Amino acid sequence: MIISRPKITISRRTLLKSGSAALGGTMLTGLTAPAIAQGDNELTIMIAQPHVGGAELASKTFEERTGVKVNIDAVPMGAMYQQIALDQQSGANRYDIFQNWYCTIGAVAANGLAVDITDLIERDKDVVQPDDFIQNVYDAYSLYEGRRYSLPYDADNHALYYNTELLERLGAEVPKTWDELNALAERATAELSGEGIHGHSLMGMPVPLLNVSTFANRVANFGANFLDADGKPAMNTPEMMAVAENYTALAPHASPTPPEIGYAESLALFLGGRVVTMEGWMDLALNAQQDTDSMVRDKWGVVPLPTLTGDPSTGRAALNAGFGVSLSAQSEKQELAWEFLKWISGVEMTLAMSSTNGTGIDPFRTSTVENPVYQEAAPQTHQIVKEALTNAMPWPTGPEAPQMLEILSRDLATMLVGQKSPEETINGVQRAWERILR
């Protein structure tokens, strides 16, 4: 999800497999070269730094096919919304296409930053193939007040990764419930911390994409929701209180100190064999097995997240992170930019990016998770992806969502270090959200 590697590695399997892997030259299909007016042979896309690898792959193949150069402007993950807003408000208007975190789609649309592409999708549906998008992802990532302002670029949910060697040392089983996960973490830390090994790597850094993701894993499985059916805050419910208490109970037995652990730190701990379990995105599987510095190659496994009761049929994932790509409302090359938007989220490129280590892209199309190329690249996770995303819990996406999630993230961090109790935290977030949504 949010890990970039210094070099893109395109595996031989992706190049050699049939099934429109689409990685270069004459292998590419499904792209009609647009009519390009003189001087209109360049585009600029704003992409978050961890996803530059996917954009480079898409822009290279697009230029080979059409002659249109796509310039990539990489920005920090947390600065995407501010960057596109500043670009348009200042009149610079550098971007033709921009990446957005799906929880900002309401703000992007309400503030007029993106083009309403609903009619373009319908016009070009034979190429876009909207029915191939995993629909739960497609709607959450693109819809605002019944209109669409984005196409998916990276669909994200978590699974539970575990170190098989450490589990064997402990004589333990893979936890099936959240209480079992906490108990395993407590035992492992007690027995192995002298060797620098902890039970769990908990991403608790106060960034919504990080600590709200691990919190949301429990929200989805405890029967809680961020908002009720009427769109009102639902934070002060018994179910949400149980989530907060379970989350807090894990912190003392996780790698210290959770509010200082982001994705890079968590990944390093897992790949270094220093934690027993970790909640992480789907491309962690590629890192574990293919990274040259991985110390857990062939010593790891992955399963769907624990559930409240241990019955996997009752489990539900959360749409943690996840990104779309939009047309800038101020671009003077919107038709040309639309061609690239279709390409980067198209069937061929989705398969290519999702099957290539280093792109940071996870699947968002049914055809990708069902394709043998992706299944060979991610043999342990492809089935988890499809099942998880189909019914995953979306986060808030209204215009106020970014502010709401920042408050939740901040207060979760203070809760994890004991500055606030779970009850104080949950009730405080409820009151803050109610003020925002009045």
Image (cartoon, rainbow, N blue to C red):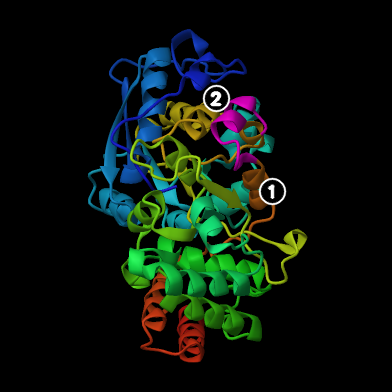
Answer whether residue 67 is visible to the viewer in this image.
yes
> For the point 39% across and 49% down, which residue is it?
271
Q: Is residue 84 left or right of residue 160?
A: left
Q: Secondary structure at mark 1?
A: helix
In the rendered image, residue 373 lying in the magenta stretch gets the answer: yes
Q: Residue 12 placed where, x, y %?
A: 47, 18
Q: Residue 406 placed where, x, y %?
A: 39, 71
Disc number placed over residue 348 in the picture, else none: 2
What kind of residue is marked 2?
Glu
Q: Quadrant of residue 367?
A: top right
Q: Is residue 128 above or below residue 174?
A: above
Label 1: how many residues lie within 10 Å, few (<14), some (14-19) or many (20+)? Answer: few
Answer whether residue 404 is visible to the viewer in this image.
no
Q: Quadrant of residue 96?
A: top left
Q: Residue 178 placed where, x, y %?
A: 61, 71
> For the point 51% across and 59% down, which residue is it?
169
Q: Which residues are magenta?
A: 370-382
Q: Quadrant of residue 70?
A: top left
Q: CA distance from mark 1 to mark 2?
A: 22 Å
Q: Nearer the viewer, residue 93 or 340?
A: 340
Q: Is residue 294 left or right of residue 143?
A: left
Q: Nearer the viewer, residue 268 or 415?
A: 268
Q: Is residue 181 above or below residue 340?
A: below
What kind of residue is marked 1?
Glu
Q: Secondary structure at mark 2?
A: helix
Q: Which residue is mark 1?
A: 387
Number of on-image labels? 2
> For the point 69% across and 48% down, which residue is it?
387
Q: Is residue 422 above or below residue 202?
A: below
